[in-house]
Structures are given as C-alpha cells and as structure tokens.
Image: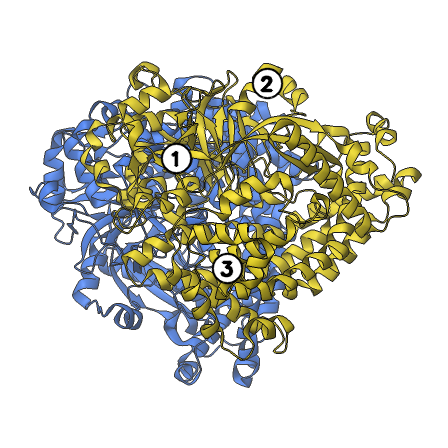
Chain colours: A blue, B yellow
C-alpha cells in the first residue's frame, strides 16, 4: 500500500462537490479548524493562541461527556446528566444527591468522586505515515489490521514512556489519517455543586432531545492534584451576557461517534438489522429497570441513573432510526455516494486503488449481519459486576502479552484508566445486577439456538435464574479490594478463584475472544482497509475541506445563535425563566413538570426574563454534553446539554435548517446560583464579583 | 328519483365501517347530536333543553365567524379576528381601533357597526322529501338541479312570508338531506370591547394555526333591537375556572366548509389544480397588499385586515395542500372509498342506484378543471367595489324574476341580508381597490388567451392600468346613497348609468352568468345528483352515525381538554400568562412578539399562572372562530380562535391524535379585563361580581 502523498497533489485540481461542508457544519479536529469558512462567513480567524487556549480549557469526562475549566482554581463545568453517574455513586440510601442536588459550601465539603477520570488534550501528532507504512504489500487484510494495531500500540507505549501522558492513536476519516493524542489525566475530582434533578432535567424524558427547553442542566466539579485544587491557567472567562442572536459561537467538546461517512451498505445494515435489535434490547432492559424501581424508593434511587441513560439512548436511537427510514435522507445519501463513485471511476488511478472498496464493505456487512446474534448474545451483558468479571479475567491474561498482541482496551497506555475503573469503590446494587443479568441471559437463551455452545457452557443444566442468583449473590466482586487481589494474583488467582461470577466470566471469555477475532478478521479488517481507501480518495476528491466522523476526541464546531422553523411557526433563539414557569403550570406542576420547592418559594426574587436555554447551529452529537459554548473572545456564553429532536438524524447527516444544539445560558446559571441557591461565592468564582444586573442578560 | 325511505330500512342490517366517527369526531347538526357516543364515552346525555339553550345562545357572524351571547343584556363574545373587519370599518386614519383596541366605558360609547349581521338559528325542519320529490323521472341532471333549486326557493319564500325569519334551505350530506333553517337576524350590532391586535394576534402569522399559543383573541359586541340592548334570555353562564384536563367540552359554532365526504376524484382535482392556483393567486395578491401597505402608516392601516385575511387563508390552504400531497392520507382516502364502493357493489339495489356515481363525479371534475381558467379569470376580482358593481347589476335584473328562477344569492329570503351589505356605509379605499383590481385583471390577461372575449369586452383597446384607474377613480360606488339610487332605479338606472365601474360590471355580467350556467349544467348538477346517490348509499351502509360536511350552519362538536404529541415531546393542555411573557422575551420583544405597553407596565398585577389558551379534541374548522367552548353544565369555559397546524388537514380528514382546537381560556379574559384594562364592570357583566380569586383558575 502506497502512502498518500501522491494522491494529495490532485486535491486542488478537482472541483468541490458532495462531502463538502456548505452549512455551519462539522466537528473539526483542532489540527484542521475550518479557517476558510470562518474567515469568509464571519471575518474571524482564530489564531494558535486562541485555539490552544480553548483546547487546553476543554475537558473530557471519560465516562462519556465533556466539560471545561471555568476558574483558575480547577473548577470544571459540565452537565448534571454527565455528573449523574458520580452523583449516584457518592449518594446513599440516606442522602440522594442525584435527585436532591449538592452544594459544597466550603472546600472541605467537596466530595471526592470514586471513579471519575478527566482528560485534557495536551498535544496531537500526525502518525499516519508510520501506521500505514507498517502495512506491507502482500499482507492479507487481517494481517494488515494486526500490523496497524501493533504499530499503534508501539507508538502509544513509546509516547507514554517518554511523556508520562496517556497516549492514544486515533483513526480519523475511517483510517484516512492516524493521530497520536496525548492527554493529561486527572483522577482526583471532587463534586462542588449540582442542582436538583427536577430542574436539571425539567420535562424529563418527554422533553429530552427537544426544544424549546427549560433545563438548568449543569454541575460543577473541582480538579485536585496532590490534595490541592489544580491551578488551571487555561480556563474560560464567564460572559453572563451570553451571545446575541446571529452571533458566531463555538463548541469545543468530545462528540462520541457519527456515521456520516459510512457507505450506503453500512447505513442499510444499521437500518435493517442493528438498530431494530438495539431498540428492542433497550426496551426490554428499560422494562426490567422500571420493574425494579417500582419496588420502592431505594430501588428507584438505585435504578435512576440507568433508567435515565437507557431512556436517553432509546430516544436518540429512535430518532436515528426514523432518519434512516426517511426515504429522502437515504436518497440523498445514495446520490452522494453515486456521485463520489462516479468521480472515482472517472480517474483510473483512483478506480484501481479503491473502486471495489464499497463492494468489499457491503460484503463484510452482509457477513456481519449473519453473525449478529452470536456477537450480541454470546456474552454477559447488562450487569456492571459481570462486565467487571469478564474484564478481570481478560486483564490478567492480556497484560502478560507483548503490548502489540493484546486485545484492544488492554494496551499499556490504557491500563492506568482501566485499573482506575476496575478498582472503583463505587457501590454496587446486587438486586439490580441480578435482574439485569437474568434478563440478558434469558434473552440469549431466546435468541440463540437451544444447543448453542455458549448457553451450554454458561448454564449447563441449570436455569438462568439459578445461575444468576448464585453468581450475583455469592460473588465478592462488589468489594474493590477483592478485585485488586485477583489482579495482583495474576492468571493463577483468576483461574483458581471459586467466586461464582468469576467462574461465569471464565466460561464466557473464550466466546468473547472468538467473536472478537472473527469480527476483526471478517469485518473490521476489511472495512478498515476499504475505509482507508475511500478516505484517501475523499482527500483526493475534496481535499481536507471535510471533517472526520466523531470519535470521542476533541472537536471544534462553530455556528450562530439562531431559532428555526418548527411546528408551523418558529422556535425562538432562547427561552427564559418565564418559560420554565409556564411549562410547569401548563402541566399543572405534574411530574416531570414539577419544580423544586425553592423555585416556587423564591420565584419573586428572579428576573424572569433572564435567558434560560438557547440554541445555536453548532454541529454536535452525544458526547458533546457539557461542552462550553464560546464566543470569539474565547469567553463562555453557554453550556451544551442536548440537541433538538431534528438533530438526532445528525448521526448520519447534518441538516442545517433545523439541527440545533441546545445549551444552558450563562446568565441562567449565575441567576440561579445567586438568587435560588444562596451560592454567591460560587457565582463570584465563576463570573467574578460583577452582579447579573451589571452584566445584564439580553 | 325515489325517495329514501326504502333505503333507510337497510341501515341497521349493515356492519359499521369506514365513514363512522370512531374518535371524538364530527361537526354534528343539532337535529342529530352524537347521543350514543356521549352516553357511552362520557355518561352524558344532553336533553332538549340543554341543546336548545346552547343553540339559541349561539350566534353566527355572517361575515364569516361564530359567537355566543354571554350576558342577559345582549353581550356577544367572539374573536378579535372575527371582529377585525368591523373594527377597521369603524376606524379612521385618526383612530385605529383594529390595531389599538377599543373600550366603551358606557352604553353611549358603544359603536354601531356599519354592516355586521348576526343570525341565531331559531328552528330546523327536514324538507328532504319535498326537495327530492320535485325531481321527476326522465329529467336531465340540469333540469333536476333547477327543480331542486326552485323548490328550495319556494320553501324559503313561504317560510319567510309565514315567519318573517330569514329562511335557508341547506343541503347536507352532499344532498342526502335538505333542511330548512330559520334565523333571527340582528343588524344593529355595537362594538363594546376589543384588545390591541398585538395581544389578540400575538405571534402574528408565524404563530397563526399553531400551538402552544398565547393570544387573547377576543372581542365583545352588544346586540340592539329598537335602539335597546336585546334581552338575551339564552346566554351562556361564564365559568372562569375553565375546564379540567380530560374534561368533556363542546363547541357550538359555524364551521364553514369541509370536504371530508368528497370523492377521490374531487380531492385529486383539488390537489392537482384548484389548490395550486388558489395558492398562487393568494401569494400575488399578498404581494400587492404588502406593497401598498409599505407606502405609509395610513396605507398599512387600510390594508391590514386584508393582509391578515390573506395570510390566514394562505397558511390554511398550504396546510390543506400538504395534507393532500401526503401519500398516507390519500391512501387512506382511497382505501375508504374502495371499501365503500365494494360494499355498494355487493348489493344490487345499491349498485343499480349509485354504482356509477363516482365515475360521474370524476368526469364532471375533469370538465371543470378544463374550464377552470375561464371560470376564475372571466370576472372582476380582488376589489370590493368591483364586486359590489357586479352584484348591483345582477340584483336589479334578478329581483324582477320569479323567485325560483333567480341566480343563487338573489332569492327572496336572502335579500334583506344582501341589501344590508350592498348599502353598507363602511369606508372604501380607492387606492387599495385600484391596486387589487389591476392585479386581478393583469392576471386575467396573463392567464386567458389574448383574444379571449372577456378581455376584449372589458378592456377593448385600452390597457388594464388605464381601464382600472378610470373605473375606480371616477366611480361613485364608494357612496352608499349612490348604490341605493341605482337599486331603486331598477334595471334602467343600472343600464343607463355612466358610472365607469358599473359599465365595467355590465360588460362582465354576461360572462359570469354564462359561466355559472355552464358550471350548473356540467358540474354542479352532475355532482349534486351523484352526491345525493352516494349520500343515500352512505345512510344505507352506515346509518346516521356519520355527520355531514360543514356548510356554515350551526354544528355541535365534542371532545376533551387534552395535549398531544408534538415536536418529539407533548404539547400541554393549556398555556399561561407566563408563556406569553416567555415567548415575547425569547424573541427579544421583536414583532410579532412585542407586547402592548400595559402588558409590561402592569405585569406585576397579573397572576401569571392564570391559564391563557388551551386545546381540546373538538372537531372544528374555519368559521368556528369565535365559538364558545361549553362544559356539560352549559357554561362557557373558553373561546375557540384557531386550530393547531395539525388540524389544517381537517378539511379532508379528522386525525384525532393530533388535531386540536385552540381556545382562549375563560379565566384569561376576566384576568385581563380586570387587571390590565380597568374593565371591571365588563368583567362583572360577564362573570358576575365574583373576583377571579373566588373562582380561581386551575
């Protein structure tokens, strides 16, 4: 395989066409910000200093979200729903911070989170040539995949040894580029403030992923090192005036994944196979969770975070599914792909290189779909402890191998974070775990052949219920010290353990490994190879005017504050506190439209015209939750917490007319902290001592 | 043609199927209220007294709306937008009541409306047999149509002579039934109160036909007779608590027209021909009106009512058009029709009677479409004075004929109302008239053949601009006395008049008559005959479990107060004053989201949680504007003013999941009158002396 320099030279020669971002579209890597678009449309050119400052102020929440430093003393702003997992983990039956909120009135009251890791992207380095050069002529596709992975692991390990920083090699543009991202890791994170869930998630699941919206979905953490708050030189200055209508704004955060560059065959497989199954599984798990929660308030507390998370996923996937079922969308995708393929076919050197790539992917998808049940159901799913057990069994085996030969997830550069999770002291809820594991194994029995070897190996002659009951009730994996002892004992300890959940994991492990290898050899290697070819052809055709699909790495989106056509009329660019009270009273204060007591008791203190939430055309997706919205001065004007219902199709295509990112307004947080929460010191730390009336919301 | 008794006996034998109202659907005539549905679903059986009271409290606004008596002293409640035409007619360049509102603080300040006629439906009588019996075996379809019309005119005239009441024979179920409706007419109507248009029509055209909504779209008139307010024994008691979620409510009003029983061929003609042309015409007229209004504030004032009206029509028709373009809707219609036709085909006596009716209608539609341009453009349109001129020319000729032979619109029973309109002293705006008539004649020139006889007759060798300028600038028709003199002078006066607009009308009249006759002979007679047959077959198949299409006659709808799925979440059952202020501030108070000064100055006086607007599942359509929403006690709980965007397709089909009627809440009117308008006496007259806090909105 040749490297891509030869292709690059053609880039300027070709006309721009499909694949080019024409709207305020794109989740751009910080090495390739959309400078031309910003200059042409907004007369703005962010310099290196601006970009570095924004990047180094941005924080990744490794359990799946984004955030930013907002004070020089390590204060980090994110969403309540990003904080929800930790809020639950620091709660107890006696004190439910997830539901009732939390407020540390002094440093000593700040609560350390059991397993929250934050990352800051310190540097980026293009390692495309190194990774691609490791693939030699004549290698089979599985061999090529292994060569790429081994090289990536080597690059990561060398970087870790040299820098001491978490080092990830990231594939962008479906493998068209590889980059080494180095992260500063923080693991001493303390909870500072969270409002009540009623107000953070006002409107609940019905209003989730919709707009107009009235949520105060924020939380504050403080980052510590060596027992002291870090000095966060790079942090965003708070601008409580917010952004005006039509003003240019940016979002810096970590979109999780998109499939905009997927081929039609991949989209069709999603639509016809993966998504319907995923939706069905989510629905049955939700039924189990709700059944558990109905048993009592403590059960409800234990299940709350997962219920939120599953409902959230369900609504998002339903939106994506509707998108793929939309004929117009698929027709657009088909047209784009056909045009791209015609363009490739017209140039012999491109056609030779990647003319068959689309068909290869289609063939791989077909095989993958045929193996879908085995891949999905030959595993222990649903239960956190069961997942820990499988990971432990694999961990002790993998870490003994050379880095380049390990399973993904066990490379040297990943181990710090992995151990942090493995040894988390967060509470486990056996009753809940038992229900979920029972459901997932029951589903496996239903979906697999009666004599499937996985079922036979895991259950033998016993029932699902008996198997799971024993494993969950008798396991000691709820104790972090026991997990540590197993890891320290190495493969012998794991192999010899009589812990029934470990025993179940040992039986499961071979099936997981077999399936992983099958997928690598038959799907991943083929699609990576074909994806690389298509990715490079795209550079030739369109240059780097396109952005890569999201990969939970730091991206910069841009756009303007702007309403949109909705429901026969227009959605406003922002909502106000008036709207919060309207929606509450318009539903007679019935859940999920009830208000925390302080909101009714102190309504008279509020300037109800203060902006609460707002929308912008910035291109975001799940994972961006908690991202700062930034103006051209690099100041924080808002806090991303959602997309509108029209944004859900954004997994596949950005539709600029209606796709909107929904954010909490910077003024709302200050107004609430000062007037409802008696949290003036915190408001001062965020916004400085200036009162809201000085900085007047507009 | 036989009468329908023979068919009726089959009704019970057939299973219920398509065409049956399964949801809270239907605009029911007061002779056939949906008693079974009300009893089964709500355990409620309105008695004769209840029905009579509601009917006699209901008022038709003959210029196109509904209303109700709401005090024993003749006070009538309707919408601001129903009152808009009169508000403009009593305004002047110095005082714009349409925009700024009006408040008569005493009887002497109440303003008499120049040409507002209100009707109350006093009695109903089934005259189906009489009308149908007039059609004799062997008559051609045009002969049959003329026979029916002559008989109807005779029935009307006899009723008028006997009762002194306006008497209309109304065709229901596409001619399946004929009813004689007798109305008490009121013509001394005085304006009592109207709020500012900014608040009545808050959100303007963008928010029109949408929900959630925040409009205080009401106005109050008082009905006089013999110089005194009428004693309105039948009036609705005001209930300021409104209706609870899920509560049964009724709407009594005058839906203008629906096409739910139309055949597929008729719907396709609408979709492919009539609606596209109607939309194009509305758009060009709106452009003319906006151009005129842009010239200055007085021009804007003159054009305001028509701009509102045209925008309103445009949005409604666009919604209907979208509905007809929706494949699912048309597929549903096609399925219903196919099922009904199968059912007919399965019974020889039905098949013989009406098996060919659908094809007859389809053939007539085809001819009608081919003649569409002649029908539409061989006329003087757009200008009120030009329309008056044509009517005057026709009037003097028609009233000399026997009643049964006159053109529709000139029958004896209609003349009182017609003369009231003809002699209206309302101001005319020649500049505006000239623009509109110029545009419509220019369009005629564009659309008709260059040598079309109408164009030749009307323009001769002159330009449109010259012709219209002379006609409008030199006509004396702006003067009501001149119109009266022409009518009193009879055909000779009209024929001899040198008034240039009358001259233009004389040239136009033969084309209008010719086209009317052509449509009667080729379309109306065929469709009436076929419609009758289908209508009777429907009775046979489904009994009177269906309701007739709307005909701007009094109907009763029922339903419950209920939100609906919208925008990925749910629309609430009601909005509040909080929501008004939210929407205003969320658009930075920019028009059409600005507020009258009193609303910002007096915001502190309001209980902002007071309900403002609400939705119910009641089945309404244009013409229902101003209808009371009534609870089972016969009390007024709201005031219909709109449907949501999902209701626009209601012209063709009622989709109960999302079709909602939008009403002003009874509490909002009282709250505003007392706290914003210093109109306590009026509030007292409406609601009694009880304060809002006594009757507490919920």
Mark 1 or mark 2, whichever is nearer to me:
2
Q: Which mark is residue A486?
A: 1
Question: Which is nearer the eye, A72 or A4?
Answer: A72
Let me know if residue B258 appears in the view. yes
Label 3 is found on which chain of the structure?
A: B
Q: Residues within 10 Å of mark 2 (few under 14, many from 20)?
A: few
**Left or right of A361 in this view: B175:** right
Q: Secondary structure at mark 1?
A: helix
Rendered residue at 58%/20% (across/down): B52
Q: Secondary structure at mark 3?
A: helix
Mark 1 or mark 3, whichever is nearer to me:
3
Location of mark 2 (residue): B42
Question: Which is nearer the eye, A180 or B584?
Answer: B584
- The image quadrant of residue A211 is top left
On the image, the x and y values in percent for residue B51 come to 59, 20
Location of mark 3 (residue): B386
**Left or right of A450 in this view: B290:** left
């Amino acid at each position: 395989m040749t490297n891509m320099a030869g292709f690059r030279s053609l880039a300027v020669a070709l006309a721009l066409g499909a694949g080019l971002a024409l709207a305020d579209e794109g989740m751009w890597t910080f090495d390739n910000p959309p400078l031309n678009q910003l200059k042409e449309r907004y007369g703005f050119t962010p310099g290196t200093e601006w970009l570095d400052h924004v990047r180094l102020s941005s924080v990744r929440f490794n359990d799946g979200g984004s955030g930013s430093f907002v004070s020089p003393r390590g204060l980090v702003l994110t969403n309540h729903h990003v904080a929800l997992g930790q809020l639950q983990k620091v709660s107890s039956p006696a004190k439910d911070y997830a539901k009732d909120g939390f407020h540390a009135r002094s440093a000593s009251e700040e609560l350390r989170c059991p397993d929250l890791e934050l990352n800051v992207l310190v540097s980026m380095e293009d390692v495309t040539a190194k990774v691609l050069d490791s693939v030699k002529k004549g290698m089979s596709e599985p061999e090529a995949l292994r060569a790429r992975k081994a090289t990536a692991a080597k690059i990561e390990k060398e970087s870790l040894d040299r820098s001491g920083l978490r080092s990830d090699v990231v594939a962008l543009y479906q493998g068209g580029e590889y980059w080494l991202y180095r992260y500063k890791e923080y693991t001493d994170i303390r909870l500072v403030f969270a409002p009540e869930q009623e107000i953070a998630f006002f409107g609940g699941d019905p209003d989730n992923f919709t707009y107009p919206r009235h949520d105060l979905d924020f939380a504050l953490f403080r980052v510590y090192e060596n027992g002291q708050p870090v000095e966060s030189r790079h942090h965003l200055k708070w601008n409580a005036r917010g952004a005006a209508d039509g003003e240019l704004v940016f979002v810096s955060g970590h979109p999780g994944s998109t499939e905009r560059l997927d081929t039609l065959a991949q989209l069709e497989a999603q639509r016809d196979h993966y998504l319907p199954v995923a939706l069905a599984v989510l629905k049955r798990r939700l039924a189990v969770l709700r059944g558990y929660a109905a048993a009592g308030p403590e059960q409800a507390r234990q299940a709350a975070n997962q219920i939120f998370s599953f409902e959230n996923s369900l609504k998002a996937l339903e939106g994506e599914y509707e998108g793929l079922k939309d004929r117009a969308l698929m027709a657009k995708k088909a047209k784009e792909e056909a045009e791209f393929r015609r363009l490739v076919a017209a140039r012999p050197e491109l056609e030779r290189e990647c003319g068959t790539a689309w068909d290869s992917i289609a063939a791989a998808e077909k095989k993958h779909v045929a193996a879908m049940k085995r891949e999905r159901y030959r595993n222990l799913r649903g239960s956190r402890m069961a997942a820990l057990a499988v990971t432990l069994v694999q961990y002790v085996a993998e870490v003994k191998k050379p880095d380049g030969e390990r399973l993904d997830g066990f490379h040297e550069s990943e181990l710090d974070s992995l151990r942090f999770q493995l040894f988390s002291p967060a509470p486990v809820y056996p009753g809940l775990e038992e229900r979920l594991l029972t459901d997932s194994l029951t589903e496996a029995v239903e979906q697999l052949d009666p004599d499937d070897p996985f079922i036979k190996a895991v259950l033998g002659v016993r029932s699902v219920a008996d198997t799971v009951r024993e494993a969950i009730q008798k396991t000691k994996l709820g104790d972090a010290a026991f997990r540590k002892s197993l890891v320290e004992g190495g493969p012998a300890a794991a192999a010899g353990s009589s812990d029934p959940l470990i025993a179940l994991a040992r039986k499961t492990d071979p099936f997981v490994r077999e399936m992983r290898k099958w997928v690598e050899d038959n799907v991943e290697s083929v699609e990576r190879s074909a994806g690389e070819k298509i990715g490079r052809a795209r550079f030739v055709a369109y240059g780097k005017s396109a952005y890569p699909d999201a990969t939970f790495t730091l991206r910069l989106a841009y756009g303007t504050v702007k309403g949109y056509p909705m429901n026969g009329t227009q959605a406003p660019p922002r909502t106000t506190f008036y709207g919060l009270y309207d929606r509450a009273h318009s539903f007679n204060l019935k859940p999920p439209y009830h208000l925390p007591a302080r909101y009714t008791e102190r309504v008279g203190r509020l300037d109800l015209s203060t902006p609460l939430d707002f929308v912008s055309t910035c291109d975001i997706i799940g994972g961006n939750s908690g991202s700062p919205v930034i103006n051209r001065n690099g100041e924080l004007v808002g806090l991303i917490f959602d997309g509108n219902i029209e944004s859900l199709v954004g997994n596949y295509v950005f539709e600029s007319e209606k796709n909107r990112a929904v954010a909490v307004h910077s003024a709302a947080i200050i107004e609430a902290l000062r007037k409802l929460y008696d949290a003036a010191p915190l408001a001062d730390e965020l916004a400085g001592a200036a009162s809201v009336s000085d900085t007047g919301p507009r």
